Image (cartoon, rainbow, N blue to C red):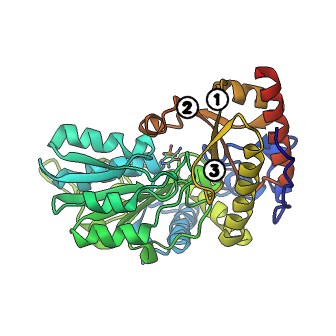
Amino acid sequence: MNAPVTIPPVTFDRRADFPAIAGWTYLDSAATAQKPQVVIDAITRAYATDYATVHRGVYARSASMTEAYEAARVRVAQFIGAATPEEIVFLRGATEAINLVAQSWGSRLQAGDRILISTLEHHSNIVPWQLLRDRTGIEIDVAPLTDDHRIDLDALEALLTPRTKLVSIAHVSNVLGSIADIARVAKAAHAVGAKLMVDGCQAAPRLAIDVQALGCDFYTFSGHKLYGPTGIGVLWARADILADMPPWHGGGAMIETVSFERTTYAPPPARFEAGTPHIVGALGLAAAIDYVEGIGLDRIARHEDALARAARDMLRSFNSVRLFGPDDSAGIVSFAMDGVHPHDIGTILDEAGVAIRAGHHCAQPLMAALGVPATARASFGIYNVDADIGRLADGIAKVTRIFG
Ligand code: PMP
């Protein structure tokens, strides 16, 4: 080990808001975030006293639940700067949102059309496009990374062609924490007539999002990474694009009229919300948004920035550690250790009460590009404090002792 590192104090301590992390150093928020009591209370209240279905009932409780569900849509629209709440489609999460865009919007693509993604994408932003490629004969281009592990935007721009119909990239990498300049990509994509889809799963909990300022056409994120419930997520798309997209799932709630001869479809967002939605999930997500905005996204970003930098400095003090991702990574730090499998790092840390993720992080092509089978990843959330870096340091010291 090199010289000891001083860890700067972080900006706030919200551990008391999160009942599930008592006595535990949870460094896996990029996989899923723990839930604050206010979100747990909102979910409990919705089931215990307020529960009824939405959009169909004639009784008062159903009307008030419908109001709350639609208010959650308004809350999400405000959160990401959507022009209208009708641009917000509630889905299970980002995976479902990207599949929706691939199957619905993508159904108009033809052989020879191209979609441009990047090397660092999560499987959920790769496989739906491959399924579309298999159905339609489109081509998929892949932008490489820079040496400091960002999407190489010069190379991305060079890959744009008049046949490129869509660029689909992560706002923040779930492995590297690198942040993409979305406004720049939007301009470049639009210059060739392509649309831009942004996977905001790792950005929504860490950065203030304004989809109109970003200039993208589609944006998605999952509620569970934003301190909300699982099973609820969001697709935002510009109203004119959504209005032009065909339905993808058929069933109740997405229709205007149904007969055996002919069915007509509801306008968005209902057109894309077939079946009884995750009513309570939407309410929980709205409570989570209230919670994070109560703290302030800017403060959260600074807090996680301080933690990620401290973690990087601490990890650098171990000669055997190799870091991935840029120094200004957004709350996510991936690393490997000479001669130690990341799973062993994870297991030893778990014994020390520190939870990290080890594996390919649903980004196998990125692992191949980095030349590793897997990485260890520490990712930070609202509830982490500088003591967590100390515990991580103690755990890494133990790994180096065990593996020599
Ligand atoms: N994209 C990124 C960057 C992610 O980190 C994740 C979740 N690990 C997803 C997409 C998929 O999100 P979900 O599993 O919630 O649909």
Rendered image quadrant of residue 41? bottom right
The C terminus is located in which quarter? top right
Mark 1 is on which residue type?
A: Pro
Mark 3 or mark 1: whose residue is earlier in sequence: 3
In depth, the one of 83 and 149 nearer the eye is: 149
Q: Which residue is mark 2?
A: 374
Q: What is the spatial separation of the Cα atoms under label 3 and label 2, in whole angstroms?
A: 15 Å
Residue 8 in sight here: yes
- Residue 255: x %, y % from top left: 28, 57
Q: Is residue 178 above or below residue 231?
A: below
Question: In the rendered picture of this protein, how many numbered marks are placed on residues?
Answer: 3
- Residue at x 67%, y 72% (from the top left corner): 298
Q: What distance separates the C-alpha of mark 3 from that of mark 1?
A: 16 Å
**Marks 3 and 1: CB-CB under 8 Å?**
no
Q: Residue at x 84, y 55 (%)?
A: 7
Q: Is residue 390 left or right of residue 82?
A: right
Crowd class of label 3 (few under 14; some 14 to 19; many from 20; radius 10 Å): many
Residue at the image point whose x is 62% and y is 49% from the top: 229
Nearer the observer, 401 or 75: 401
Label 2 near label 3: C-beta < 8 Å? no
- Return the mark for residue 332: 3
Contact between marks 1 and 2 (CB within 8 A): the answer is yes
SS under mark 1: helix
Label 3 CB less than 8 angstroms from ligand 1: no
Q: Is residue 312 above or below residue 335?
A: below
From the top left corner, tell me how far across and down residue 243 is, in percent. 27, 67
The one nearer the camera, 245 or 398, is 398
Q: Foreground: 4 or 235?
A: 4
Q: Amino acid at mark 2?
A: Ala
Please provide percent x and percent y for residue 27: 72, 44
Location of mark 1 (residue)? 342
